[in-house]
Structures are given as C-alpha cells and as structure tokens.
Image: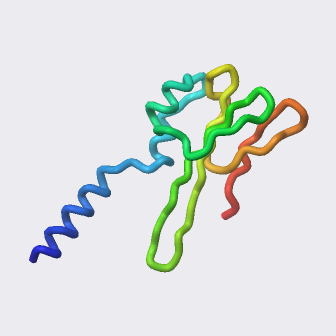
Amino acid sequence: MKRIMGAVALAAALAGCHTTGQKITNLSPESSRDQVVATLGRPDALGTMGDFEVYTYLARHRSRVSMAHTDYTVVMKDGHVVQFGPGVARREGLHGVVIVPPES
C-alpha cells in the first residue's frame, strides 16, 4: 500500500512540473535577458556568436530503454530575444545565427 501511495504522490508531483518545452512558449521576441532567466532558469550553456548571446537549455527525457533529449536554444541580441525554440544555434553567414531544429 505504501508503494502505491508513493507512486501516486510521485506522479502528482511530476504532473505539476513544467518542461522546458512548455516554459519556453512563455517567451516572446523582445523578452529581456532577465525574463528569460526568470522563465527558464539559468542556462545549461552560455555562448556567443558574433553579436549574439546563445543560451542552451538541456531537456533530458529518461525512459527504461534510452535517454532521449531535446535541447532548447534562446538567441539574444542587445539583451533581448531574437529567436528561440528546439534545436541548436548555428552561424548563418557572417552576421547571423539560426536555430537548427533536431532531427526527427
């Protein structure tokens, strides 16, 4: 009986958690750096590409068989979001950055 109650409590706790994918939908272009950190937390990786700041958030999905992942990227310029979504940032030409979506 204790195991069942523990499993129910764990499932309820996990149901209340929002994934990075759900949280990132609260961002919008022009969101500030502070809004990004308040919404998603500290990034797992922080880098720069030219004039752009690139925040990377790692979302790991653990199953019995494997550990899949979807990384999310937020690209900012002058302290404000210019793009965000699933995938990794790559340079596009001399002065641009694009988020490359994960392969299916």
Compared with residue 51, is residue 5 higher up or lower down, i.e. above or below? below
Q: Residue, x 63% and y 39% (percent of image)? A: 46
Residue 51 on image: x %, y %: 77, 26
Q: Residue, x 44% and y 78% (percent of image)? A: 64
Q: Nearer the viewer, residue 44 or 97?
A: 44
Residue that protrudes farthest toward the bottom in the picture: 65
Can the viewer see residue 94?
Answer: yes
Residue 103 placement, left or right of 56: right
Picture quadrant where residue 103 is located: bottom right
Please say which color scheme the image uses.
Answer: rainbow
Residue that protrudes farthest toward the right in the picture: 94
Residue 56 on image: x %, y %: 61, 44
Can the viewer see residue 84?
Answer: no
Q: Residue, x 46% and y 45% (percent of image)? A: 22
Residue 23 placement, left or right of 78: left
Residue that protrudes farthest toward the top in the picture: 78
Residue that protrudes farthest toward the left in the picture: 1
Residue 13 placement, left or right of 50: left
**Quarter of the image that includes the C terminus:** bottom right
Compared with residue 41, is residue 19 higher up or lower down, i.e. above or below? below
Residue 10 on image: x %, y %: 25, 63
Residue 55 placement, left or right of 100: left
Q: Residue, x 59% and y 47% (percent of image)? A: 72
**Quarter of the image that includes the N terminus:** bottom left
